[in-house]
């Protein structure tokens, strides 16, 4: 395809309006910020943002509601999340369409993102009956030691553009059953989706008898986020976004002894071992690198290929990249939609220029795909660059479809390359050698929060704890025991012996 034929922005605006109407959203029109579609690069609506006073009021109301919500039995708190999940099922198509309209995801991926919201709602409803602590053996006779988990307070959720609904729902569904209330500051690039999610949750609260104040939405950019970061009533700031954002948020929350859960950038790698099943590896690599136009935190950015298989793999990989259909994300044949804005396209171009200056060879892609009519929309062909020499640019996250291919001789060397980046989100290995797979998963293997064998780096399930190490921030969201981050723990000892007994056998008589 030489150019992308764009639909008229008026049609996209009408589609957005129809989805919002079906969900019951009244768009707060204004000129503080703009809802834009990356499909044409044009504005859909001007919106009223939340100023300092509104954000303060939202936190105050969330805190006030928390004081009652924390005493609602957890399984009853689950009722609101159950109803929310039902409403998301009812509006699956509308939400997916809004995701495509506002962040440019292709239909299948937008639909999958909404499925993730349903999955986490189901998970959280089950969790609402499983917020259990432990009974711990006491060293003193006639004493019982228990650990209990209690609601934490107001959770401030700051989210990124690329998972505009799912990431919020991971946090919110779990926080609500844990007895917390939520104030959400979505990405300024995804306000319409946020309005839709907020409306559905408000309906769920109303229909399940939960207080309306369990959830508040504040629209705006960095400054609105900072108001949550600095407010001592916000017990936990769960912030998803770039490493620079986390670098700003983490220390500010820590300075007031608040808690933060940081889900930041990745620089994910997959290793292709000599025994890899290439039929399995190729489509997995293709999706991980080019899916979501390379705009997932878990997108594959580095492919570390054994020297014995690189000559077989590379021509097949570049041919597959060449065949990728780039275009209108509403078109059923499109696999790669637009980038969120022209800025990442520029970053991608610069990264390609730097890596080729350092001895890399551009094998395919990297060129902008023109649109008809001409527009500011940023469509790009996913690129593959082979680089055998060292280049610092490979250690950076370029949030666009750009895959570096590196080669290796020994597994130790491959693991060292995988780990030689500041970020630590996701890693995978393609191998049929079990010993190799086990080493990769072991303490001397990949140092990331997500480590896979024979699948790509992206596409995690909500049942596991999601997040990464190093500059990825160390936070964990979703399943497993990630709910602990949304609660406070108390350790309690009950003395039923009728005698004074000090720990460590201390005598104080
Ligand atoms: P971003 O950092 O530009 O913005 C993320 C959010 O933070 C937005 O809501 C923004 O308004 C807010 N923000 C920015 N600076 C802030 C500050 N100083 N104080 C408070 N709030 C602030 O990120 P983006 O471009 O929207 O998303 C892409 C990035 O997010 C990538 O780096 C990607 O890897 C990362 N990401 C990580 C995960 C994960 O789970 N690890 C998931 C999705 C995206």
Image (cartoon, helix red, strand yellow):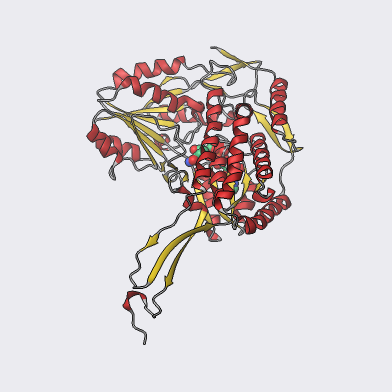
Pick whichever, 192 or 23, lies toward us.
Answer: 23
Pick whichever, 311 or 13, lies toward us.
Answer: 13
Q: Is residue 330 left or right of residue 285?
A: right
Specify whether residue 125 is in view.
yes
Considering only vertical position in the picture, is 75 above or below 299? Answer: below
Give residue 30's quadrant in the image.
top right
Specify whether residue 99 is in view.
no
Q: Position of residue 413 (x, y in %)?
A: 27, 36
Return the residue found at the far bottom: 509
Pick whichever, 50 or 236, lies toward us.
Answer: 236
Q: Residue at x 42, y 29 (%)?
A: 355
Q: Is residue 250 left or right of residue 411?
A: right
Q: Position of residue 507 (x, y in %)?
A: 34, 83
Q: Position of residue 345 (x, y in %)?
A: 54, 28
Pick whichever, 359 or 494, lies toward us.
Answer: 494
> Total marks drawn?
0
Q: Residue at x 25, y 25 (%)?
A: 275
Image quadrant in which the C terminus is located:
bottom left
Q: Position of residue 14 (x, y in %)?
A: 72, 23
Q: Residue at x 35, y 16 (%)?
A: 315
Return the residue found at the far right: 30
Considering only vertical position in the picture, is 474 above or below 441? Answer: below
Ligand 1 image position (quadrant)? top right
């Amino acid at each position: 395809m030489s150019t992308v034929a764009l639909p008229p922005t008026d049609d996209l605006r009408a589609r957005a309006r129809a989805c919002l109407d079906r969900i019951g959203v009244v768009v707060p029109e204004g000129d503080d910020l703009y809802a834009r579609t990356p499909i044409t690069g044009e504005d859909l609506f001007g919106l009223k943002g939340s100023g300092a006073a509104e954000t303060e009021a939202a936190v105050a109301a969330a805190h006030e509601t928390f004081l009652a919500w924390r005493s609602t039995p957890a399984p009853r708190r689950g009722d609101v999340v159950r109803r929310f999940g039902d409403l998301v099922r009812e509006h699956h198509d509308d939400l997916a369409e809004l995701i495509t309209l506002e962040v440019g995801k292709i239909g299948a991926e937008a639909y999958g993102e909404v499925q993730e919201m349903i999955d986490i709602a189901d998970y959280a409803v089950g969790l609402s009956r499983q917020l259990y602590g432990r009974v711990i053996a006491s060293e003193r006779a006639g004493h019982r030691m228990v650990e209990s988990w209690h609601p934490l307070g107001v959770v401030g959720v700051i989210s990124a553009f690329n998972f505009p609904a799912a990431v919020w729902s991971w946090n919110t569904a779990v926080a609500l059953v844990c007895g917390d209330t939520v104030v959400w500051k979505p990405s300024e690039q995804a306000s319409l989706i946020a309005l839709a999610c907020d409306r559905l949750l408000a309906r769920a609260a109303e229909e399940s008898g939960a207080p309306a104040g369990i959830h508040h939405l504040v629209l705006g950019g960095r400054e609105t986020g900072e108001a949550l970061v600095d407010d001592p009533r916000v017990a936990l700031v769960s912030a998803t976004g770039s490493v620079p954002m986390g670098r700003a948020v983490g220390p500010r929350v820590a300075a007031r002894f608040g808690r933060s859960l940081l889900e930041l950038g990745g620089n994910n790698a997959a290793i292709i071992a000599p025994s890899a099943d290439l039929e399995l590896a190729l489509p997995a690599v293709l999706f991980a690198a080019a899916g979501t136009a390379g705009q997932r935190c878990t997108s594959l950015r580095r492919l570390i290929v054994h020297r014995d298989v690189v000559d077989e793999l590379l021509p097949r990989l570049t041919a597959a990249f060449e065949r990728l259909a780039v275009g209108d994300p509403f078109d059923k044949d499109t696999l790669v939609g637009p980038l969120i804005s022209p800025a990442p396209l520029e970053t991608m171009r610069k990264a390609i220029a730097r890596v080729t200056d350092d001895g890399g060879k551009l094998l395919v892609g990297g060129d902008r795909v023109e649109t008809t009519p001409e527009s500011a929309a940023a469509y790009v062909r996913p690129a593959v660059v082979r680089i055998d020499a060292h280049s610092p640019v490979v250690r950076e996250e370029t949030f666009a479809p750009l895959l570096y291919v590196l080669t290796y001789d020994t597994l130790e060397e491959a693991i060292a390359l995988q780990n030689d980046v500041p970020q630590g989100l996701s890693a995978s290995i393609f191998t049929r050698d079990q010993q190799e797979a086990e080493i990769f998963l072991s303490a001397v293997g990949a140092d990331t929060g997500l480590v896979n064998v024979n699948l790509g780096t992206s596409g995690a399930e909500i049942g596991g704890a999601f997040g990464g190490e190093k500059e990825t921030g160390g936070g964990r969201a979703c399943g497993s025991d990630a709910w602990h981050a949304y609660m406070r723990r108390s350790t309690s000892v009950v003395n039923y012996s009728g005698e004074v007994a000090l720990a460590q056998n201390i005598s104080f008589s």
